[in-house]
Structures are given as structure tokens and as C-alpha cells.
């Protein structure tokens, strides 16, 4: 069925999109590459051109579409500082429109409007739309592919299925899980056909449509699959992904971790999203129904009731406009209740409950078909009513329900089978959005149907009792939420993520000074008594101006005092035409990016067995930087114990890790027990061999990588380089 989209609806959708875009682009000056994967993807802006090849093993992390997009944007004047984040910002904002389109096709206008505002104000999605990661861009292409595929199945269009397959291929080029539209569409369509679709849809044409989508997706992705042959083929990627797969053992614990992430990142934005989405969608639905031809037929209904000898109050019922003001009051009241409950129990939890209830309702009573039948029958008009037609789903409501169910059930089962990284639940969250949008639309229609039915047949005592009981339970839940909830939590999405950048620039300054002998660390001398014996640390005795004893700082507060101050990153620290030192980094691509921006010669290493660098036969001071990612790399500590005698520790530089990156390093239980882990450090070492070796002895030529300078590249030994 083709439905019209009113100008008013488009204005509301545009408002949701503008709001979502603003929330994702605000405070861009607080953004800096911080996450490990961000450093790998954004390395295309500096490493590829200097080294002449991609970052080592980058093909294991993601296909090349995102890094190449970042590289292209970085070359645009004025976009250098935000280039790593622009793909996620732009496609994350467009996801608002994609979810509106998908929800509208599956469940109608109300679901589309609700879904648009839910995505627009989603804390979790905003967070990942402000990071140089593949998850938000890939989700956009996944939603778009599913949308076009559903339209193609409904209309039997080969062209639509070809486009859906191409969009799936683009998602596949963005993230290795980009094939998800194939799983969602095939499983959802199979369930629908077995349940009821076989009555209207022959099997062979359906298989043909699905086959076209699969083949086009594979053909679109095939060039990258072919390019992987030089590095071991897709089997190398699959083997790497297998390391993150855990299975069903501990499934419930990892699901609890994902729930914690949503609780932690939730704020008043999520609560406002529920209330605003429900208010906008509900009000729009009520206004459209009031303007429908249903009300033009009410006098005929009243006349028919009078001629049948019914009571005068029934004649009055026939003269009413429908839906009545109490329906609008229910929608507005529900918006307020949802906002309060979301602030108390969390927006994601509440959306999940709405989605599950909505899926059950869709299977028991498909809303679109029920409402259309009820409306035309009661009005005595066999034509579709304008308001009804505008809000109807454009596909079989049972197909809609199965698509939403397949997406939700599949992601709920498989997401906790992998290590509980926060970003993995983004696709599961999208299925919750979709199911919740369908649930809200189903409730709108059920409420309108109930209002119309009450105009003909007054509700029974049992019905009134059940409604009163439900109202009582909802009221009790609201009161409980009000008592348990404190002040609305503030958003984390604009938390500053520049601390690692500041620490890296401080580290760069130390390296430059140390390389010319201008930096040394002097430890405070121990406190001794008159006999020269070291005394214990004196008791805390810091007081304020009034002489009141100040509380002794906690370990966390002491660490915060060590965090590197904000750095001026507008100009490099050095622009020397000849390299004076070299910095190697293990497991810290983001740090190397910032050191490179500061003007240092840097390169990654995959072990710590490297020798000193040299320039024209002369050894250069050769440094090593390790951080929290290196210490968590399997096998690193064993190698470090074997090689650490070759290095001399210089200093440590501390930085404050943002919440989203901290969750990537430690499980929530550990973070709760050790809040001091929020402050991490970078350790700086110098290679003794490079410092002590005579000129021309044993060094590796720093010019071997294709030019020497402040942004030069130091060649890695061929035995450890990744061949492309």
C-alpha cells in the first residue's frame, strides 16, 4: 500500500533530524582520538602516506571504507581536526531519518515519528556518533538496507532488492558485521512466509528476491574479499574475530554488562526522548484522526441510531467527534509517565519493555489491519479514510512483526556471546528502537479503537475494573520511580576526550627535551632524622585558613593531581627538517597519532626487540612508549620481562580516560571496586643501545622509510612488517 506523507509530518521529522545533528556536533572541540580502534582507523591520515602502506594489521579491525573516508575528509581544508569523527557524525545524524523511514514502512506514521525522536536523543547512539569508529556508520547502512529490502519484498521489486543488496555491501565495506541485513531479512521473511505469507506470496518468487539481494551484497563486497587474499584471506579475519567469541558460557553476565553500559550512559536526554517522541507522535495521530472523514459520517451514525429507537444518549454519542479529547489526554499523560519512569529505571529498559509488549500485541492483533477494518465498518464507508491511510504501514503488518522480532531476538541472543565491549550492543539497541516504535503505534491504535467501540457499546463493569487496575499499577510505578530517582543525570556524551591528547603532547615535549639533554627527573629526597635514618611518611596535617584539618586526599584524588594539563595543539612542537630522535609505540595507535601531530618521528612496533634507529650512520635517541593497551596485550609482559633491561625508564605521564574507553579496558565490576583506574599512564623509556652506541655502530637508518623529517617514518625490520 502506498501512503501519503503530509507536510506536517515531514516538518516534525526535520525537527528531529536537526535536533539529532546538533546534539552530535556540539562541543566538537572536546573530541580527540582516544579509543584504540580510533587510532587504528585515523592512522590513514598520517601513517599511510608516510609509510606507504596501511597501519599494520588494520585489515583485521575493519574493511577500508571508514579509514579511506577519514583520509579524504582530512585533506579538505578546515576539516583536519574533526575529520576522524565526521563520518560517524554525518551518518549518525542521518540514522534519525533512516529509522523514521523503516519504522514508518513497517508500523505507520506514529511509529516513524516516535522512532525518529528516540534515535535523535539517544545518549548511547550520540556517544558513538562522536567517535572515529565503524559502529554508527555501519548501523546507518544496515537500517537502510533492511528498509529497502522490506519494500522490495512487499512490492516484488527486483530493483529494490538489488539496491538493498548494494547497501548491505556498503555496510560490509564499513564493518565486518555488515552482512547483518541478510540475516535479518531472510530470517524475518522466512518466519512471515511460514506463518501467513504463503497465502499471498508464492515461494519461488520470494526466493528469487532474496537471492538477488544476497548475490548483489556478495558482489559488492567481493573486491575487498579478493584484496584480503594477500594477507591470508578472510580466514585470517575470522580467526581474529574468533578470539572475541565466548559463546553461551557467562552469557547472562555479559548481558548484564551491556545493561550497565546503557544505565551508565543514560541521562535526561533518554528520558526526554521517550516523552517527546510519544507526545509528538500521539498528538499528530490524534489530530489527523480528528480531521478524517470519520467525523463527517458521525451524523449518519447518529441518525441511524435514532431511527432504530435507541436512547437519546446514544444519539449524542453518534454526534461526537472521534477520537475524543480523553484519547489525547491519554497520549499526553503517557508521555509524562514515560518520562518519569525512564528517569527512574532507564530509557533502554523501558524501551525494551515497550518493544516486547508491542511485539506480543502485533502477533495477537496486527494493528494496521485491525484499525482499517474497524474504521471503515463503524463509519459505514468502504473507502479508506484519509487519516487511516496516512498512518498505515505500507507492508503486511505480520511481515513487519517478524522482521522486528528476527532482528531483536537474533541480536539479543548473539550480542552477549562476544566480549562485552559497549559498542557491540548498538545493533541490538536499534532493534529495541524498532520494536518499541511498533509497540507505541500498536497502543495508539488500540486506544483509538477502544474509544470508538465505547461510543457504540458502553464498557462493561469488568472492562472498567481492568482499566482502573492498570491505571493503579501505572500510578504506583510512577510514584515508586519518583521516590527512587534523584536529580536527572547529566549527559556523558559531551565528556571531554582530550586528556590522552594532552598527555601525548606533554610526552612529546619531554622527548624533545630529553633528546638534547634538557630533561631529567629528580626524585624528592627521603625524609631522615638526626641520625640519617629514613623516617616514615609524616601524618597528614593540611589545614584550611581557619585551621580546620582538611581531609586526606584519596588515592584517586592524588592521581588526578598528576593528570597532564591541557596542551596547546594548534602548532607542532618541532618543525625540524632533520630527525633528532625516534619514538616507537607498542599498542597505542592514538598516542602515536598525537605524537606525530606534535612533530615527532614515530612508528608502531609489534614487539620490543627492535634496535636503535640511526640517521646517516649516526645513532638517534630511540624511545619507547607503552600504555594501558600494551599492558593488556597477551604475551607482552613476558616479552617485556625479557627485554626491559635494554631500556631505561624516563618518566610517566598521566591522563584521564573517558568512560566509554574505560569500559573497553575493564569490566564494570572492576571499575566499581577501583575508581582510580579512571586515571591511566603512559610510560616513556629510552633504548640504552641507541643512547650508548658510538656513531655508525649498529643503528638502523632513519631515512630508510622514505625521507627524514619531523613527520618522517622509521623503517620496521622486514621480518616484522605486515606484507600487503
Image: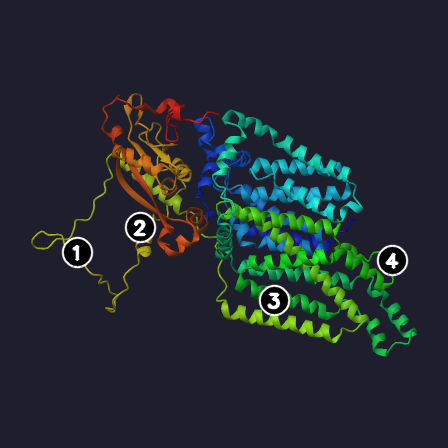
Q: Classify residue 420 as left or right of residue 578.
A: right
The vertical placement of 530 against 546, above or below, is: above
Q: Mark 4 points at which residue?
A: 382
**Residue 366 x, y percent position in the rendering:** 74, 56
The vertical placement of 65 against 704, above or below, is: below
Q: Classify residue 360 as left or right of residue 538.
A: right
The answer to whether marks 3 and 4 mark residues whose Cβ atoms lie closer than 8 Å is: no
Q: Regarding mark 3 in the picture, which secondary structure is present there? A: helix
Q: Name the residue under label 3.
A: 336
Name the residue at the bottom extreme: 312
**Residue 572 x, y percent position in the rendering:** 38, 37
Query: Foreground mark, 1 or 3?
Result: 1
Q: Distance between the residues labelled 1 and 4?
A: 93 Å
Q: Which of marks 1 and 4 is nearer the N terminus?
A: 4
Dot label at residue 562: 2
Query: Foreground mark, 3 or 2?
Result: 3
Q: Classify residue 333 as left or right of residue 59.
A: right
Residue ID at (55%, 50%): 125
Q: Distance between the residues labelled 1 and 2?
A: 23 Å
Q: Mark 1 points at which residue?
A: 536
Residue ID at (48%, 67%): 486
Amino acid at each position: 500500500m502506498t501512503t501519503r506523507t503530509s507536510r506536517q509530518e515531514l516538518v516534525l521529522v526535520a525537527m528531529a533530524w536537526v535536533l539529532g545533528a546538533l546534539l552530535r556536533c556540539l562541543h566538537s572541540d572536546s573530541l580527540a582520538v582516544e579509543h584504540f580502534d580510533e587510532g587504528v582507523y585515523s592512522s590513514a591520515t598520517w601513517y599511510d602516506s608516510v609509510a606507504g602502506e596501511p597501519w599494520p594489521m588494520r585489515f583485521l579491525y575493519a574493511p577500508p571504507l571508514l579509514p579511506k573516508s577519514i583520509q579524504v575528509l582530512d585533506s579538505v581544508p578546515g576539516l583536519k581536526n574533526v575529520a576522524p569523527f565526521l563520518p560517524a557524525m554525518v551518518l549518525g545524524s542521518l540514522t534519525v531519518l533512516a529509522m523514521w523511514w523503516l519504522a514508518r514502512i513497517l508500523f505507520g506514521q506514529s511509529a516513524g515519528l516516535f522512532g525518529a525522536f528516540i534515535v535523535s536523543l539517544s545518549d548511547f547512539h550520540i556517544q558513538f556518533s562522536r567517535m572515529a569508529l565503524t559502529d554508527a556508520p555501519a548501523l546507518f547502512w544496515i537500517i537502510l538496507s533492511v528498509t529497502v529490502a522490506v519494500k522490495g519484498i512487499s512490492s516484488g521489486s527486483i530493483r529494490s532488492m538489488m539496491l538493498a543488496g548494494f547497501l548491505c555491501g556498503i555496510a560490509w565495506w564499513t564493518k565486518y558485521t555488515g552482512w547483518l541485513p541478510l540475516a535479518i531479512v531472510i530470517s524475518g521473511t522466512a518466519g512471515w512466509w511460514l506463518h501467513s505469507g504463503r497465502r499471498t506470496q508464492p515461494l519461488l518468487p520470494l526466493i528469487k528476491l532474496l537471492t538477488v539481494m544476497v548475490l548483489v551484497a556478495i558482489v559488492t563486497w567481493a573486491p575487498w574479499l579478493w584484496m584480503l587474499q594477500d594477507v591470508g584471506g578472510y580466514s585470517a579475519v575470522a580467526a581474529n574475530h574468533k578470539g572475541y567469541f565466548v559463546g553461551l558460557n557467562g552469557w547472562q553476565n555479559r548481558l548484564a554488562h551491556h545493561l550497565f553500559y546503557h544505565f551508565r550512559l543514560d541521562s535526561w536526554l533518554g528520558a526526554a526522548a521517550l516523552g517527546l517522541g510519544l507526545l509528538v507522535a500521539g498528538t499528530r495521530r490524534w489530530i489527523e484522526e480528528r480531521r478524517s472523514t470519520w467525523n463527517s459520517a458521525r451524523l449518519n451514525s447518529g441518525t441511524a441510531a435514532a431511527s432504530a429507537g435507541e436512547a437519546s444518549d446514544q444519539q449524542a454519542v453518534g454526534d461526537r467527534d472521534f477520537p475524543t479529547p480523553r484519547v489525547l489526554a491519554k497520549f499526553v499523560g503517557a508521555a509524562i509517565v514515560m518520562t518519569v519512569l525512564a528517569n527512574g529505571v532507564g530509557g533502554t529498559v523501558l524501551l525494551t519493555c515497550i518493544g516486547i509488549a508491542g511485539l506480543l500485541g502485533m502477533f495477537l492483533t496486527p494493528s494496521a489491519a485491525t484499525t482499517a477494518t474497524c474504521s471503515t465498518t463503524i463509519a459505514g464507508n468502504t473507502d479508506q479514510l484519509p487519516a487511516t491511510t496516512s498512518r498505515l504501514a505500507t507492508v503486511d503488518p505480520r511481515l513487519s512483526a517478524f522482521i522486528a522480532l528476527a532482528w531483536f531476538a537474533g541480536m539479543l541472543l548473539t550480542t552477549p556471546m562476544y566480549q562485552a565491549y559497549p559498542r557491540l550492543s548498538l545493533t541490538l539497541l536499534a532493534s529495541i528502537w524498532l520494536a518499541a516504535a511498533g509497540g507505541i503505534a500498536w497502543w495508539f491504535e488500540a486506544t483509538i479503537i477502544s474509544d470508538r467501540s465505547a461510543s457504540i457499546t458502553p464498557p462493561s463493569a469488568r472492562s472498567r475494573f481492568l482499566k482502573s487496575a492498570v491505571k493503579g499499577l501505572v500510578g504506583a510505578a510512577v510514584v515508586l520511580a519518583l521516590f527512587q530517582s534523584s536529580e536527572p543525570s547529566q549527559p556523558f556524551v559531551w565528556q571531554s576526550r582530550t586528556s590522552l591528547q594532552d598527555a601525548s603532547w606533554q610526552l612529546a615535549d619531554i622527548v624533545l627535551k630529553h633528546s638534547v639533554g634538557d630533561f631529567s627527573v629528580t626524585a624528592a629526597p627521603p625524609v631522615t632524622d638526626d641520625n640519617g635514618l629514613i623516617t616514615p611518611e609524616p601524618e597528614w596535617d593540611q589545614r584550611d585558613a581557619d585551621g580546620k584539618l582538611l581531609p586526606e586526599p584519596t588515592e584517586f584524588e592524588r592521581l588526578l593531581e598528576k593528570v597532564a594539563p591541557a596542551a596547546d595543539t594548534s602548532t607542532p612542537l618541532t618543525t625540524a627538517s632533520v630527525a633528532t630522535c625516534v619514538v616507537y609505540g607498542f599498542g597505542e595507535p592514538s598516542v602515536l597519532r598525537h605524537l606525530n601531530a606534535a612533530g615527532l618521528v614515530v612508528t608502531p612496533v609489534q614487539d620490543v626487540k627492535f634496535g636503535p634507529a640511526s640517521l646517516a650512520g649516526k645513532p638517534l635517541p630511540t624511545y619507547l612508549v607503552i600504555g594501558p593497551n600494551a599492558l593488556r596485550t597477551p604475551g607482552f609482559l613476558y616479552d617485556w620481562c625479557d627485554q626491559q633491561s635494554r631500556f631505561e625508564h624516563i618518566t610517566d605521564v598521566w591522563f584521564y580516560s573517558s568512560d566509554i574507553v574505560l569500559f573497553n579496558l575493564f569490566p564494570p565490576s572492576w571499575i566499581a571496586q577501583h575508581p582510580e583506574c579512571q586515571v591511566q599512564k603512559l610510560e616513556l623509556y629510552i633504548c640504552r643501545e641507541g643512547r650508548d652506541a658510538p656513531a655508525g655502530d649498529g643503528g638502523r637508518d632513519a631515512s630508510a622509510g622514505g625521507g627524514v623529517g619531523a613527520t618522517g617514518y622509521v623503517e620496521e625490520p622486514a621480518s616484522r612488517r605486515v606484507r600487503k
